[in-house]
Image: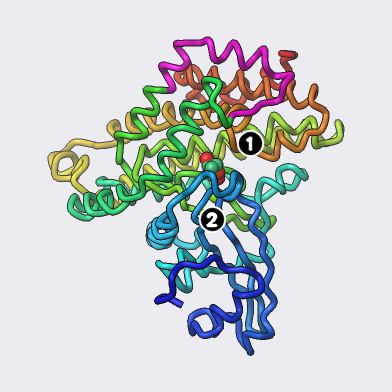
Amino acid sequence: MTDQQYCALSVETLSQRLGGVDDVASRVGGDSSTWRVREVGDGNLNLVFIVSGSAGSVVVKQALPYVRMVGESWPLPLYRAHFEYYALVRQAQRAPGIAPEVFYFDKPQALIVMEYLYPHTILRRKLISGERVAQLGETIGEFCARMAFRGSELSLSSPEKKADVGLFSGNVAIPAITESLVFTDPYYGAEMNHHTPELSPVVDELRRNARLKAKVQRLLMKFTANTETMLHGDLHSGSIMATDTDVRVIDPEFSQYGPMAFDLGMAVANFLMAYFSQPAHRQPQALEAYQEWILEVIEACFICFDAEFRHLWQTERTGILFPKSLFEEQGNSADDACDALLEEIRLDALAYCGIEMHRRVLSLAHNADFEEIKDNALRAKLEARNVLMGQALILEPEAYSDLSALAELARAYNQQEVL
Ligand code: SR1
Ligand code: MG
């Protein structure tokens, strides 16, 4: 398959095209003409197939040369699949057991064959249907900390880190999407934007707030200029799959080197959007307990991020940053430096969180938590709470770095009649 010119797979052609690839055939098993192939891609960009045979199932993900949710009018380079592959390999090394295992990668075809996660389902669907997942916040917090620390010069050697930043700097098309859809478009009437019509008074006021826009642009500046670590880059609840007791992270195609706080902020934003949308999805008797559980997930996420980062700081600080030769070996503790760095990450994560809360209701790619609410008046009311909390986090992250203050803020907006 490797020598062939790129050609998008289909349910009809997949078995014939991948049947001769040993790494795939041995996992699926049997005669490839008997394989069952389903296209299950419901994301914004790619083709995703589940292929099953007598020995098991695999997932085949193939990039399309355009943005699937928009169509061929928005071309997107196939090379993004290479970066997804590079990211999956690094995630397996830096945070083992969380990303799907890769079985096969075909660069010209922009396709990755990987582990089929079963009986896992997309976390966003679980949050909409009110399911609980044990250790959710803990796993995501720990994952973010491991990726943040082990992808940085706190851990990597300087040449290794520079080479990786160089490699990922070839991925120009995907960061450009984040730079506009996440950081810029929500704050003016960009062409592809849409929002619930009843939300307009809140949106108009937000877009008039020059202080807010300036803060967001400063965060964009950090996002573009700061190559601290390798990010997942799109850690929303559709990029997390789970059972009741197991949590996995998928889809790192938005991976790039960027600020340590970014993934943590994105993940927490998606938990908060699940929180604010709950009144539309839960019966009143189940609502409060489930919303409180989501707040516990957020708290656990931050606590476990800090704990794991501190642990790695003590045990794996082998890079050029804050070297032990400068601290411990001179009789100085480096603990205060770690605390200060974690505080900075917490504040930036809260601000990135606020931005993600905005883009998912104001820009192009909305999330189902709000989008599936059929009653527009209710949807706008819940989205308004989310937008206003996001604004508070961007403008004043210092006020909410204490986790109980953050939870109180969410509870306060959850009660507020904005519209
Ligand atoms: C055009 S891509 C829109 C969004 O989908 C992805 O999941 C990212 O979140 C991106 O911003
Ligand atoms: Mg994705």
The circle drawn on residue 352 is none
Image spot of residue 90 (x, y percent): 38, 59
Q: In this picture, is 119 found above or below 76? A: below
Tell me what residue is drawn at x 86 percent, y 31 percent. 284
Residue count near mark 2 (Cα–Cα under 10 Å), binned few <14, some 14–19, many ≥20:
some
Image spot of residue 252 (x, y percent): 47, 52
Q: Is mark 1 within 8 Å of ligand 1?
A: no
Q: Is residue 217 left or right of residue 111?
A: left
Q: Is residue 21 left or right of residue 16?
A: left
The answer to which of 36 and 358 lies nearer the viewer is 36
Image spot of residue 65 (x, y percent): 49, 55
Amino acid type of the residue tagged 2 in the rendering: Ile
Q: Is mark 2 within 8 Å of ligand 2?
A: yes
Image spot of residue 95 (x, y percent): 43, 57
Query: Which residue is label 1 attached to?
Result: 366
Q: In this picture, is 300 found above or below 383? A: below
| Magenta region includes residue 207 | yes
> Which stretch did the figure color magenta?
193-216
For the stretch drawn in magenta, the main secondary structure is: helix
Q: In this picture, is 357 found above or below 369? A: above
Task: Provide the secondary structure element on which disc 1 rests.
Answer: loop
Q: Quadrant of the C terminus?
A: top right
Q: Of label 1 and label 2, which has the lower sequence position?
A: 2
The answer to which of 107 and 100 lies nearer the viewer is 107
* Colouring mode (rainbow / by chain / secondary structure / one colour): rainbow
Seen from this angle, which residue lies furthest front?
Answer: 73
Query: Which residue is label 2 attached to?
Result: 250
The image quadrant that residue 86 belongs to is bottom left
Task: Provide the secondary structure element on which disc 2 rests.
Answer: loop
